[in-house]
Image (cartoon, rainbow, N blue to C red):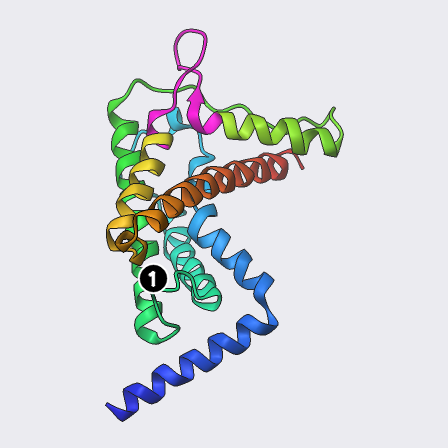
Amino acid sequence: MPRRADSGGMMSTLTARFGARSRRVALALCGLGVYGWPAPLMAQPLADAPRFLPTREEVPLLISMPIAGALGAQVLGSPEGWDRTWDGFGNRLGDQVGFLLIEEGVRRTLTLVVPPLAPRASCWADDRSAAANLTAGYGCALWSTVAARPAVGDGWRFNAPVTVSLLAATGTSLAWRPERADAGKARSFLLTRTAIVFGGMAAGRLFEDWRGSR
């Protein structure tokens, strides 16, 4: 027991010092792991990947992003209901893994059962200024998370695989989060995480489009 207490104290000291010196690094890790990790996986055209199991190329990302998110949340002390100890880190890592499993499972299942969608067009245009790409391009990337063109036909269709999977993972994650004990905190968490998940994924998609245009 004393050894366990010392380990918890060491974790608390390390995370406190790191948070005081490198808070922006923690925010980046947290945003990447908690909210930004779906973007590179979802950047691929849904019509080109009607599969349930991840590819070999996707596995390293699926492993590293929850760890990055848990580390960032540990440094930030988020949520406050989990201490900055090894147990707290385990809770945060479990939160990330749980979100990932639900989101990936729902998205890949829906991709197999709904009518195929057309490959997503790039939202980054080289004939636009950087400022225009960041505004119009971001709007395009955000729109593509909730709507997509069908593989056959015209118009737009509800992008069920992406939208439903993100909402399902966000809503289900409240079941193990400490915010569930307070109705106000629960609503705030759901609204905040939903906004950041969709916003972060749109930013990730726009970055992927920019990188693909280089």
Which residue is pictured at 35% across the width and 62% down the height? 92
User: Where, by quadrant of the figure, is residue 203 drawn?
Assistant: top right
User: Residue 63: where, in percent of width, then height?
Assistant: 37, 56
Q: Is residue 118 above or below residue 179?
A: above
Q: Residue at x 39, y 73 (%)?
A: 84
Residue lying furthest top: 153
Q: Quadrant of residue 116?
A: top left
In the foreground, 4 or 65:
4
Q: Position of residue 196 (x, y in %)?
A: 47, 43
> Tag 1: residue type?
Leu
Stretch in magenta: 144-162
Point 67% across, 37% down: residue: 214
* Quadrant into which the N terminus falls: bottom left
* Image spot of residue 154 (x, y percent): 45, 7
Q: Is residue 12 above or below residue 3?
A: above
Left or right placement of residue 209 versus residue 143 in this view: right
Q: Secondary structure at mark 1?
A: helix
Residue 99 drawn at (x, y percent): 32, 48
The residue nearer to you, when weighing 110 against 99, is: 99
At label 1, counting other C-alpha atoms closer than 10 Å, the crowd grade (few under 14, some 14-19, many 20 or more) is many
Relative to 174, 17 lies left or right: right
Tell whether position 48 is magenta: no
Compared to residue 41, the image places residue 68 above or below, namely below
**Quick check: 167 left or right of 18?**
left
Say which residue appears at 30% left-offset and 72% top-offset: 87
* Residue indicated by mark 1: 93
